[in-house]
């Protein structure tokens, strides 16, 4: 047994009192004092056990701190991060920084794949100046290493495995985040709150996220199972089974997602035969071109959703309103309104949308824009 381990073990009676010596009993005043001390530490332990564990540690490097990312990697970063490269799923990572009120630190513009003037145009408002930043990736997703070296970001953030090694070879700090599940998504928010010293914003958002999703579940908890609308989410393209965050969002909204069981089985794709056997009430799409492609498939003409043109276009604001979005709480309420307007009104939804973007993106959404978003115009 090491000396360290010995030192923390409780001492025996003989070690405490000395051989052949009997310790006197503790009198009432002294006994009450020790009981008070023990009770204080017990209550303190209960209190402090609920404080979230933090990942930010002092570093012996001047002006640096250590952070532990979602892969368990310890990375030294500046104590105050002033520039961040968002490499990979850029709109997703950008939305975290914008919620943390750190959009001004983003040092790269998204590629044309993440077109600011197209589906993710709201990022121009959430983080002004992005369109004037350099590209750090080509449209084929290869990194533009010379631009990264010139930018020399305080930190790079990615969820793309190949980028870790590339940035590490440049001797620049890079951290790994994850978006595969709802839990990991919220861990990413918490972690980046640590990185940017904005744990207050991160904690506030996570509390809101849970509160609004619980509210959505309560709204739909009394829906009769036979009355729930059946649907398929053609996201991000038809025949791809959505992952856990999307299925969790649809369940909270009281929808009967026909891919839910496949998702639990880790099935990645479904087929035309599955779609025909399900015959969904509604098909969700992220753009109208998807709806046209499905309508043009002669194999699907017998589907009710095709014959009735029962498509709902899902908005894209900071990101597509799927489960893989920090907008999931308002997306759940939006789904409820679109599926069951009798239990959640348009007026309530508009107020929630306007409040959400004002609170977390510092953006004043006009009633007209809120109406357009609700109607799938975005």
Image (spheres, rainbow, N blue to C red):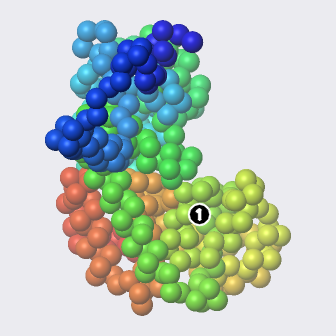
Task: Report the quarter where the N terminus lies.
Answer: top right
Residue 136 horizontal/vertical position (percent): 43, 26
Res. 200 in view:
yes
- Horizontal side of 231 relative to 188 (left or right) equals right
Answer left or right for 311 relative to 355.
Answer: right
Name the residue rendered at 38%, 15% in the picture. 18
SS type, badge 1: helix
Quarter of the figure with the C terminus: bottom left
Frontmost residue, 236 versus 181: 181
- Identify the residue at image location x=28%, y=53%: 204
Q: Residue furthest left?
A: 29
Residue at 41% over, 54% down: 326
Q: Is residue 180 above or below residue 286?
A: above
Work out whether 252 lies above or below 125.
Answer: below
**Residue at 58% from the left image edge and 29% from the top image edge:** 161
In the rendered image, residue 10, in percent from the top left (x then y), is placed at: 43, 24
Name the residue that disc number 1 marks. 247
Percent x, y for residue 55?
38, 31
**Considering depth in this image, is 355 or 50 the residue closer to the camera?**
50
Question: Is residue 108 depicted above or below 5 in this figure?
Answer: below
Name the quadrant containing residue 90: top left
For disc 1, the neighbor class at 10 Å (few under 14, some 14 to 19, many from 20) is: many
Whether residue 330 is visible = no
Residue 172 at x, y percent in the picture: 41, 15
For the residue pair 9 and 285, the one nearer the viewer reads as: 9
Disc tally is 1
């Amino acid at each position: 047994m090491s000396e360290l381990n010995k030192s923390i073990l409780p001492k025996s009676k003989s070690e405490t009192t000395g051989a052949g010596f009997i310790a006197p009993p503790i009198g009432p005043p002294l006994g009450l004092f020790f009981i008070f001390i023990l009770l204080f530490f017990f209550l303190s332990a209960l209190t402090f056990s609920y404080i979230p564990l933090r990942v930010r540690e002092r570093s012996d490097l001047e002006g640096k701190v250590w952070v532990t990312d979602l892969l368990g990697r310890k990375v030294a970063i500046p104590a105050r991060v002033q520039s961040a490269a968002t490499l990979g799923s850029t709109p997703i990572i950008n939305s975290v920084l914008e919620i943390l009120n750190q959009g001004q630190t983003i040092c790269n513009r998204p590629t044309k794949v993440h077109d600011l003037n197209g589906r993710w145009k709201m990022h121009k408002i959430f983080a002004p100046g992005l369109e004037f930043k350099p590209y750090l990736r080509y449209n084929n997703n290869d990194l533009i290493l010379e631009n990264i070296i010139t930018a020399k970001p305080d930190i790079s953030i990615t969820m793309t495995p190949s980028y870790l090694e590339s940035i590490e070879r440049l001797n620049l700090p890079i951290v790994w985040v994850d978006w595969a599940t709802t839990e990991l998504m919220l861990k990413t928010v918490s972690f980046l709150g640590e990185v940017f010293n904005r744990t207050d914003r991160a904690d506030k958002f996570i509390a809101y996220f849970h509160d609004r999703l619980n509210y959505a579940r309560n709204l739909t908890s009394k829906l009769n199972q036979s009355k729930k609308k059946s649907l398929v989410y053609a996201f991000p393209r038809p025949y791809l089974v959505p992952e856990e965050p999307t299925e969790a969002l649809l369940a909270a909204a009281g929808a009967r997602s026909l891919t839910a069981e496949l998702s639990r089985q880790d099935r990645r794709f479904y087929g035309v035969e599955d779609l025909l056997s399900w015959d969904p009430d509604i098909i969700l799409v992220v753009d109208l071109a998807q709806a046209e492609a499905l309508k043009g498939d002669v194999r699907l003409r017998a589907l009710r959703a095709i014959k009735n043109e029962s498509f709902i276009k899902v908005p894209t604001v900071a990101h597509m309103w799927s489960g893989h979005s920090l907008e999931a709480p308002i997306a759940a309420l939006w789904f409820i309104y679109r599926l069951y307007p009798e239990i959640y009104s348009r007026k309530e939804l508009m107020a929630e949308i306007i409040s959400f973007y004002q609170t977390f993106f510092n953006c004043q959404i006009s009633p007209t824009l809120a109406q357009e978003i609700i109607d799938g115009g975005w």
